[in-house]
Image: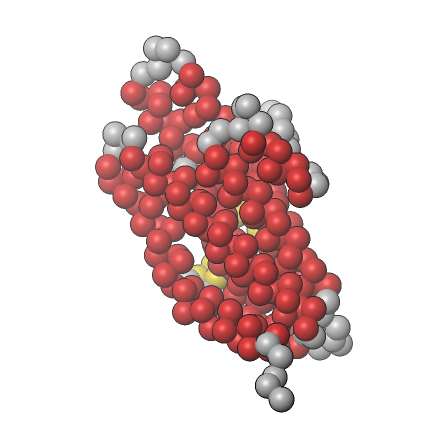
Amino acid sequence: MAEEKKKILIHTADGDHVGSVGGHQPQQALRGMPGKGYWAAGAGPDGLPPAGRGGAGLSGVAAAAWGVAVRALRSDDASLQKTAEELRQMTDYMVFQIDEELRAREPLDRRRVEENVTRTDLDSALRVASDIPNEIVYIMCRCIELMKEVVDKGDDLTACSALAAVHLSMAAIRCMQAELLSYAKIMDDDVFGYTIVREAELNLADHQELVDGLVEELTRRLTRAKK
């Protein structure tokens, strides 16, 4: 029986983006793993490739920081609560995608150690593995959009958690870009390789001004005023 997946609509500045959440559990699920578990998984003898595993860990830590920022919000504003709830859903969805990223990379990990792997089989595995990194970039950017809408309503705890989350999200995005570059480099299909790399680049470029402004604003709010 095919796995049934729940659809989720992600509202981004670039338009709506439909994602799906399923119940698949890879061999090494990261969902619910303590922070040190992410890095232990990547540092272990079977932790491949480091960029993807590191990006998954950073995404998980970023989700935790976004969660702290949301919980720090104290307001009866209905519109604020709606945004905070969407942000909570996005962090849950992102943590699900961490497991999906590992699942999607399983065929590639197998192909890499096969002695007589064909070019067709390798390219097919590369296409599957490249699917989730761009999804994680979407989610990280959407979380940043949402936090921009609510961050001025919170206190210093919200600002501190949000600033940490922005930096962690950007680090996760960079890791996903590194992973996409590594896939594109060995793909036979140059057009497909260029497309997956460019998609992440464009999504980040569309949000760079927002990221820079948010970092500047949050840093200013947390800086001690001169006497």
Q: Residue at x 54, y 61 (%)?
A: 166
Colour style of the rendered protein structure: secondary structure
Residue 35, given in percent of the width and then of the height, sits at 67, 43
Res 200 visible = yes
User: Image point 70% across, 41% down: which residue?
Assistant: 34
Q: Is residue 180 left or right of residue 80?
A: left
User: Is 226 located above or below residue 161 in the figure?
Assistant: below
Nearest the viewer among 208 and 221 is 221
Q: Is residue 190 above or below residue 64?
A: above
* Among the 4 quarters of the image, the one containing residue 196: top left
Whether residue 81 is visible here, answered yes or no, is no
Report x, y in % for residue 215. 51, 69
Residue 174, position as x, y percentages in the image: 43, 49
Which quarter of the figure is the C terminus placed in?
A: bottom right
Is 162 above or below relative to 34? below
Indicate left or right for 2 with 195 as reference.
right
Q: Quarter of the image holding residue 180?
A: top left
Judge by depth and name the residue closer to the eye, 223 or 209: 223
Residue located 41% across and 39% down the image? 179
* Residue 212 position (above or below residue 89): below
